[in-house]
Amino acid sequence: MKVTFELRRTHTLVVGSGAAGLCAAVRLRAEGIDDVRIVTEGLNAGTSINTGSDKQTYYKLSLCGDEPDSPVEMAKTYCSAGGMHGDLALVEAAVSARAFLHLVNLGVSFPTDAFGQFAGYKTDHDPRRRATSIGPYTSREMCRALIRRVKELNIPTDEEEFAVELLTVPNEHATPKQPKRAVGIITLNTSGRWTIYLAENIVFAVGGPGGLYKTSVYPTGHTGAIGLALREEAAAANLTESQFGLASVKHRWNVSGTYMQVIPRVVSTDNDGRNPREFLRDAFGNDASEIGKMDSLLFLKGYQWPFDSRKLQEGSSFIDFLVYRETMEHRRVFLDYKQNPTGFDAAALSEEAKTYLAKSGMTNLNATTPIERLEKMNPAAIQMYREHEIDLYREMLEIAFCAQHNNGGLAGTHWWESINIAHLFPVGEVNGSHGTARPGGSALNAGQVGAFRAAELIQHRYAETTLDVDYALQVAQDRLVQLQTWCETAKTSKTHWRKERENLQYRMSQMGGAMRAMNTLDTALQVTTEDYERLLKDGVAYDGEHDKHEALRNRHLTFAAMTYLNAVSFAVKSGVGSRGSSVVFAPDGNVISENASFRDKILMTQYDSATQSITNHWQSCRPIPESDLWFETVWTTYREGKIY
């Protein structure tokens, strides 16, 4: 079979255009790599440019006041929840100021006082005031600043290209740790044109697994592409460690911060919007003290937004669980800002809530409504929804318990290169550098730090061209014939990609999300595995050239789901228990407590194409390195290039 395609070659190819990918392209140029190209579904299509919260946080080393801080102290914070390598934590801490100030120099207006100090505040899982923000759209403004710089540098950017295959070949400089190397990707556009990209290096900035879940706060257009790398046997770490929380569904947005601190009324209805009831009261009762406790936990959801298994029994995450349970009973849940919860009494609130609201200028709370409090504390939060045709003054805000971020992902070195595929650099959310829990805003920092590290290593280790282009092209053409053959078979499939994806996403939200039970996990894994095997054999139907890429996307999404479920099942059977943003239920319905012995371990997952099986094993966390920081020694090692 002969397949027509375009061929494009570049030294370093950046796949994806979120904040991490854009930064990588800019930093590659700064490091002296002139031949850089970005390939993306769209500069405005990714998660970074389409997400936020009431006050979207960026996490970095503290740069204000007299409170002491250091990279090692920050690394200890990263590692405190467990499941994180110390060297990765130290890098994210040490490079955070440099990456942050790079954004400042590009025009991202993080606030300072009159003396130039970057004001900070405490975010979740943060003992110091390392967090900062420019409001609801921090990551969007980061992207806009980076896009401006990309255009100033005339970095070629190919939009509306959908990656459908990652290309690897045996590594000509093979080591036991990196037997393969990345050489390119295959893309398809909406007119049905195939393109083969060959490159010396691949910066893989494809984001998190947004396409795996039905109830999700990932932007609708973001699906992620980690499955492309997993299919090529890229090792992964901590796939089990995701972050979940409450978010609006009409416009996908975290309802954190002031959205909860103003204490809205929480209501559920039938699917058609009838029979409203304040269902939280069923769990708390009608006693004034219990109502005060319920309202105080609602308040705490503001800065304890991520679901945390440690806060399930008596803490704020009990609210998340009640919302989840209500939606599982096929009822819709809403936040109503027009009126206070029934029985609301400011005097019954916790001292923490009363103090915070008083310092925010909220006096005589009983005489105000949630929307009035929100208008005074954060009017931009109201305007954000108004921009998406949701008027909080007039309508309730529908919410759900949603997947928000994967702390795990592809396993990388402390230079953000894949640990087992050379020349492949996963940056951003697709890189699994985070542990069981992470400080709010640290994902934005990790993406920028990863971009810096990847660009620096590429310049110092992979600047020369070593790619066997003829061999790589032959591999690419063989893969392309396989893809086209699959597409021809898929035309006659009895199932359509939309229905298949809908089933996959529903299954992952129901069985592979935050609430995990062994019996349903086994069922989900078996069904997903069978779906993938059938999909490989029979394909999945599509309507025409304009959505052929979506059918192909189902291949790597289903493979990713199978891999994630395999990892989750292994972890649960290992006895890890409830930790981070997930809860494990015993067969009798009781919650299984965390097994603390796993805190110093990371779950490694990898596909083996020879046996067509997925393997998992626990790896001990590497400690925070104890560096020899004597200046003359560091200077010599740096000058001689030994750090690379």
Image: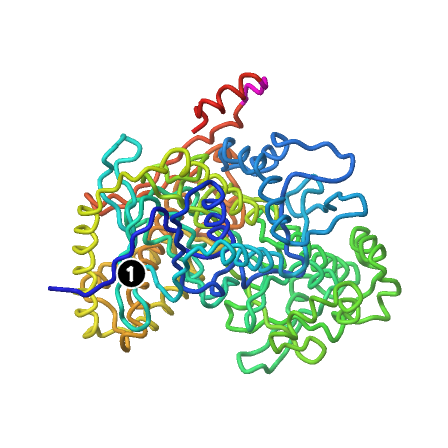
How are the colours assigned in the image? rainbow
| Quarter the N terminus occupies | bottom left
Instruction: Tell which of 348 and 425 is nearer to you.
Output: 425
User: Residue tagged by mark 1?
Assistant: 555
Q: Which residues are magenta?
A: 626-631
x, y percentage for residue 154?
Answer: 46, 56
Label 1 amino acid? Arg
In the image: residue 153, left or right of residue 484: right
**Whether residue 321 can be seen here:** no
Quarter of the image for residue 478 reads bottom left
Residue, x 31% and y 44% (percent of image)?
A: 200
Predominant secondary structure, magenta span: loop
**Whether residue 635 can be seen here:** yes
* Residue situated furthest left in the rendering: 1
| Quarter the C terminus occupies | top left
Instruction: Tell which of 12 and 297 is nearer to you.
Output: 12
Magenta segment includes 580: no
**Up/down of 109 relative to 77, above or below:** below
Residue, x 56% and y 35% (percent of image)?
A: 79
x, y percentage for residue 166?
Answer: 29, 52
Instruction: Tell which of 405 and 400 is nearer to you.
Output: 405
Residue, x 54% and y 61% (percent of image)?
A: 49
x, y percentage for residue 156?
Answer: 41, 57
Category of crowding for the residue at label 1, using alpha-carbon neighbours closer than 10 angstroms: few (below 14), some (14–19), many (at least 20): many
In the image: residue 189, left or right of residue 299: left
Instruction: Tell which of 565 and 196 is nearer to you.
Output: 196
Query: Helix, strand, or loop for circle 1?
Result: helix
In the image: residue 66, left or right of residue 583: right
**Up/down of 534 relative to 336, above or below:** above
Quarter of the image for residue 540 reads bottom left
